[in-house]
Image (cartoon, rainbow, N blue to C red):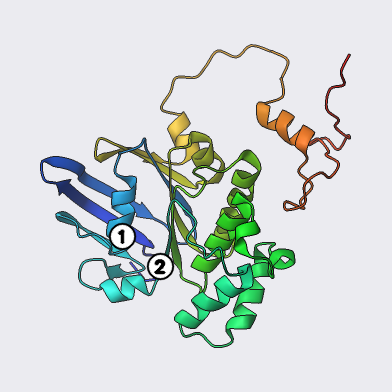
Amino acid sequence: MTAGRAPAIRVQGLEKAYKKLKVLRGVDFDVARGSIFALLGSNGAGKTTVVNILATLLRADAGTASVNGFDVAAEGADVRGSISLTGQFAAVDEILTGRENLVLVARLRRLKDPGRIADDLLARFSLTDAAARRVATYSGGMRRRLDIAMSLVGNPPVIFLDEPTTGLDPQARIEVWDAVRELAGRGTTVLLTTQYLDEAEHLADRIAILHQGRIIVNGTLAELRELLPPAEVEYVEKQPTLEDVFFAIVGDTGDKDTPGKDAHDPRGAAATPPQDR
């Protein structure tokens, strides 16, 4: 298999235990280059343990894993040079501005022209207008987008997003989803851990369910749906989802950081909240 066709991430027989508690019991999966792979599971399923092993923050008890062609156990420095990790909480400095956070990371990575790198990433994640503001004034979605932007300084080919939308409101979650799609669209391989079923459904090219330390199913959304028997179909009037109602009322104009603009529903008609009778 050539380097270009080899999976960006390969995990085989991964095991990890904390004393008598077996967290991983032989985990296997591959992640294709430039794809979004969702590792789905409940709290305590072992998702973060898998990510920490792949990021060389934790050593597996058994099994093998490679990232970008480098063995996680034997070539840790090369693995770390190929990845970026965004944890469950935004690792941003609230005292600094958004631009200063990005410039700082670029300087730490010893990259040339950190200012240009910061400006490019601010534009890419729709944060240019907030570049000079202290991060303490950012919304949750803006902080998370900045956090992801900081992870991309140096253009790592693989990025790990460990439950990136935990604690975010509905609008902020959509902002992060858009950012993740944009990453994959540019060729970045994304391993996403989440406990939100709709998040995996909306984002992932492939979904693996981790349960009791093992991958119990791994496939595309269409393949996973085929595991259930077909439902009996009856004609019913389609009702709007709660998400439809929410965005019709509060607005989703594309200017995510400016509240209070007129909202429009997905069909293009102006949507207004119900009036008091």
Element type where label 2 sits in the image: strand
Residue, disc 2 = 83
Residue 12 vs 95, above or below: the answer is above
Identity of the residue drawn at 60% across and 14% down: 233
- State left or right for residue 39 relative to residue 196: left
In the rendering, which numbered label is found on residue 14?
A: none
- Quadrant location of residue 125? bottom right
**Residue 88, image x, y percentages:** 44, 51
- Considering every residue shown, the one lying at the far bottom of the view is 112
- Quadrant location of residue 44? top left
The quadrant of the image that shows the N terminus is bottom left
Residue, disc 1 = 54
**Residue 277, image x, y percentages:** 89, 13
**Label 1: how many Cα within 10 Å (few below 14, some 14–19, many 20+):** many
- Considering every residue shown, the one lying at the far left of the view is 20
**Label 2: how many Cα within 10 Å (few below 14, some 14–19, many 20+):** many
Q: Are marks 1 and 2 in contact (CB under 8 Å)?
A: yes
Amino acid on which the number 1 mark rests in the picture = Leu
- State left or right for residue 54 relative to residue 18: right
Element type where label 1 sits in the image: helix
Residue 124 vs 20, above or below: the answer is below
Identity of the residue drawn at 50% across and 85% down: 111
**Residue 140, image x, y percentages:** 59, 50
User: 129 or 16, which lies in front?
Assistant: 129
- State left or right for residue 264 relative to residue 234: right
**Residue 2, image x, y percentages:** 36, 70
Spatial CA span between label 1 and label 2: 9 Å
Identity of the residue drawn at 73% across and 36% down: 247
Residue 51 vs 42, above or below: the answer is below
Amino acid on which the number 2 mark rests in the picture = Ile
Residue 158 vs 144, above or below: the answer is below
